Image (cartoon, rainbow, N blue to C red):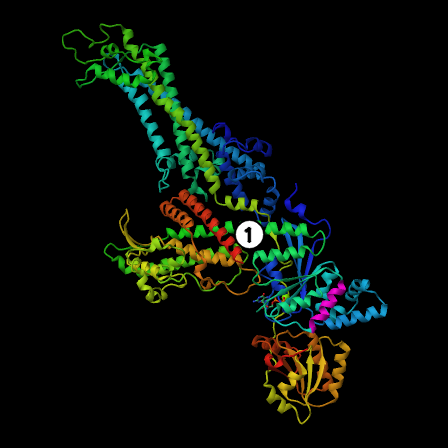
Amino acid sequence: MGAGASDRPPTGASAAAGRMRGRLALADVVGLALALEARQALLESERRTQDRALAPVLADEQGARRLRRWVALSATPALALRVRRVVHAVAWTRAVFSLGGMLLGWSATSALLSIRGPGGRISIAACLGVLVALPFLSWLATLFGGLLRGRRAASDRAPLARPLHRLILRLLPASVRSDAEAIFGRARAHAALLVRLQRALATQFLLLGGVGFGIGALAATGIFVVFTDLAFGWSTTLDVAPERVHRLVGALARPWAELWPAASPSLELVEATRHFRVAPGSPGPGDALSGSSPLLYGGWWPFLVMAIACYALLPRLLTLPIVALVVGRECERVLRLMPGALALLESLASPWIESGGEGGQERASRALDAMVPEVALAGWMSRAAGGEVPVAIVWAEAISPAAIEAEIGAGLRIHAAGGRASVEADAAVVRAVAGSGGALLVCVRGDEPPLLELLDFLAALRAAAGAERALAVVLVGGAVRDLETWQRKLASLADSRLAVARIERANARGAA
Amino acid sequence: MTRPSDEAAPSGPLPRFAVVGHPNKGKSSLVATLARDASVAIAPHPGTTLVAREYPFRIDGVPLYVLIDTPGFQRARAVLAALESRARETNASAADRPRLVAEFLAMPGQRERFPDECELLGPIVAGAGIVYVVDGSVAYGPQYEAEMEILRWTGRPSLAVINPISSRDHVTEWEAALGQFFRIVRVVDAVNADLQAQSRLLKAFAELEAGWRAPIEAALAALERARVGRRIQTARAIAEWIAQALVYDVERRIAPDESAELHREALAAEYHASLARSERAARERVQAIHGHAALEARADELALLEADLFAEGTWLVFGLTRRQLVSAGAAGGAATGGVIDLAVGGASLLLGVATGAVVGGVLGFLGAQRLPELTLVDRPLGGRLVRYGPARSPGFPFVLLGRARLHARLLSRRTHARRDPVEVEAVPAAALPLDAVFRKRLERDFARLRAADDAALARAEATQALADTLQALLAADDSESAEAT
Ligand SMILES: Nc1nc2c(ncn2[C@@H]2O[C@H](COP(=O)(O)OP(=O)(O)OP(=O)(O)O)[C@@H](O)[C@H]2O)c(=O)[nH]1
Ligand SMILES: [Mg+2]
């Protein structure tokens, strides 16, 4: 499948599937560029839905081919149409270059073969120069400029390609122009990636023009040979022996000398067609067509035809497939590097995982700013006791009776609540302590958080014991941060006679 | 069209896991870690979570399982007492207990009296598996027994997680206590569990009920793929940043008779400032890739002084080999061991790896350092430019890479339960070796990037090559850290 044939745009899944194994081509670049643009316009969620739907279908393709398949599957008919138009525009450009070259070759040859020099002779040197040497050199230049130079060059400048593409864009109908920017333009985000592709395309166009030129030249030569009598000649001011000219011409004719001996000029032909403006005395080949057979002067044409074919046409025909390969490779490269393409591939490759919480930000509590004051236990006790025996309630086995006596002093009344005790037992404790006087200490584990259950208990205690009874929560162990947690949480009881104290865990060993 | 996740989607009801326990034991932290959700409310005060919240795990929209964060028990004994009295009244057997719990919750007024218990028991009664979380750094106590008893009454399958919040002091004690109530007991640090620990825990979840294994396995496979995806994206973000920084310069037009030196300071400041900006932007990209977009950016940005980025001591720390830094000074290196601190201490952040011999080399290298240069450019249409940068030192991209790599590693291991800022500087650099193979590949990639300069296509390709190398490097980092645990 040649470059031209594979440029067919995607028309739908089936057509695309047929092309899948083909080389990557311009249509793919244009398609991807336009499809990625369309994708940009989608919402993130739409993009995701689309990707997830296509991912299983694309699973067996890799890299650029997966991208191509993606374009084929996701493109709308409108997009496919736009791609087709651009591809047609490129095909037209190729045709214009070929035909233009042909026309040029035809006209140049006709002009050369019509202009008769002195003695009615056509200059074989001018013919070779214009129809062979010039095209050959321009082939070399195209090749160098388009493919060899700058393969690794740091610069993106493509002196030939830029004006050429601007010209092409100008020639295209306005409806195609904006889409054609996808490969010829510099306005797109990926324009900088296109430089090498553009260069390869320019090379292709120029080669096609050259091929047209060669064919036009051959056709014109053929017509002139058949329908007119051509008399070629050569001349020079320099003292050049015909033998040397013969050797030179022979060297040029070597490629086809075996195939077609007549197309390799003989020494006689070279000698006979040499032409001098002034003929000194002696009769010779100097004046117009004297002496030898007129047919002899036409003897150059096979050589001219073969030279055009071999030096102007053949090299281009041989390099065209190579350039087509280069275009394909550059297409693949551009596909791979096009902005958004990698993200697309990743999105296709990775399933969409959602694991976060439902329904936006959750409702969460904040710690209170108010804090129940911390007191030093001994001082607080002496102030609060008022001569009565203090009561200690050990909550959830936070501390052993022995340890609390060691900490606060003997003669305490000790009750147990919380933990394994039942709710009724708690209520009994509340009733029991309400009747007596003395400071109330509720000993809790400082490293455990304050629970509402305890707050309920404290509230019940306060209600039973009266608003003026001294009440302190004693934290057993726990870090400074825990103390603050307790101070804030207890503040929610809004109990102005409530205090918090702390005793070290080391003294509290032996709980339970 | 079938998708891989369709097959794994459970045919019966979804596996649901209610994470319950005492307040402030890391329930929300565990959920945030497993659900990779940084928005979960986590706070040091108890009672943070007020209502049960669902965290469904979906692949391509297909739900596989649901985690439920709940408030902690607040009045467990009262609830248990009410349940027990109902059981006595109705003369119910043990088999009736699940029904009793459900009826209890449905009774009017309970939501007002026991809001937390209703929130947390609701999902369990509706069929969720129980994940009971306790803190392994505080002692076991009798106040836990009522809650565990209630959970037993629900009849739902359960497992216990010991979360060692600040120490492992009481883990064994807890294991003994929990063993009496739960068949499966696991120790998992809710805030710092790595991906392997997380997946082990999820596998334990899967054992709770028949038919839950397939969806969990599918979820784990998807998580692993997603991790690779994050790595690819991270590698690209870093590569793009380095590619840009490598050729970055600042220019200023000056009058023909002006001295370029006058501008050095201002240009250097501008250069460093925008380098720091670009690093911040790159870090934000990496954070977003890891689902930490809202993460607070701690002011540890590229310190702008020569002392940091442009100090050879720093390069050394970030994986440059001896050979690259060594010049004549190396031979006498061993003798200079005593002055390491003097020489590098002030300049570099992380001294851990600096040995005497290497510092000797650094000292020698200091003379030959190539900071960004000031160059004068004559403009074709008259006038002159003074240009600062790009940094041509061979170590420069390695420093950038080293910083980015540390940051990426911290993020890839960071769970979504953490609320503290990322501190790149706190990581010992000795944890960042760069083996010879990677160094060579990176050198080649950096050289390619520098050569590409402003040729877009060559740059794009060189950046891609660097991203490929980085991806391999990050993968090696990941697998190595997995081995370490
Ligand atoms: N260092 C460390 N801290 C932890 C760990 N687990 C929880 N924390 C801390 O403990 C505190 C409470 O954590 P949360 O996850 O809010 O606990 P919770 O059980 O959800 O608390 P409530 O919602 O209040 O019932 C937070 O400050 C966490 O940072 C852990 O494994 N390690
Ligand atoms: Mg919580």
Q: Quadrant of ligand 1?
A: bottom right
Q: Position of residue A61 (x, y in %)?
A: 55, 38
In the rendered image, the vertical position of residue A441 relative to residue B322, given as above or below: below
Q: Nearer the viewer, residue A256 or A230?
A: A256
B174 or B45, which lies in front? B174
Q: Is residue A32 above or below residue B164?
A: above
Identify which amino acid the numbered label 1 is placed on. Arg
Residue occupying the point 56% across, 33% down? A16
Residue B423 vs residue A449: left or right? Answer: left
Image check: A316 left or right of A452?
left
Mark 1 element type? helix
Tell which residue pokes out farthest to the left in this image: A281
Circle 1: is it few (<14), some (14-19), or many (20+) Cα within 10 Å? some
Give the mark count.
1
**Residue B110, relative to residue B8: is it above or below?**
below
The segment highlighted magenta reads B142-154
Residue at image mark 1? B227
Q: Position of residue A374 (x, y in %)?
A: 59, 82
- Dot 1 falls on which chain? B
| Residue toward you, B286 or B456 | B286
Q: Give B393 or A414, whichever is nearer the viewer.
A: A414
What is the x, y in percent for residue A118?
23, 14
Residue positioned 62% across, 91% down in the render: A383
| Residue B74 versus residue A385 in the image, above or below | above
Q: Is residue A205 visible?
A: yes
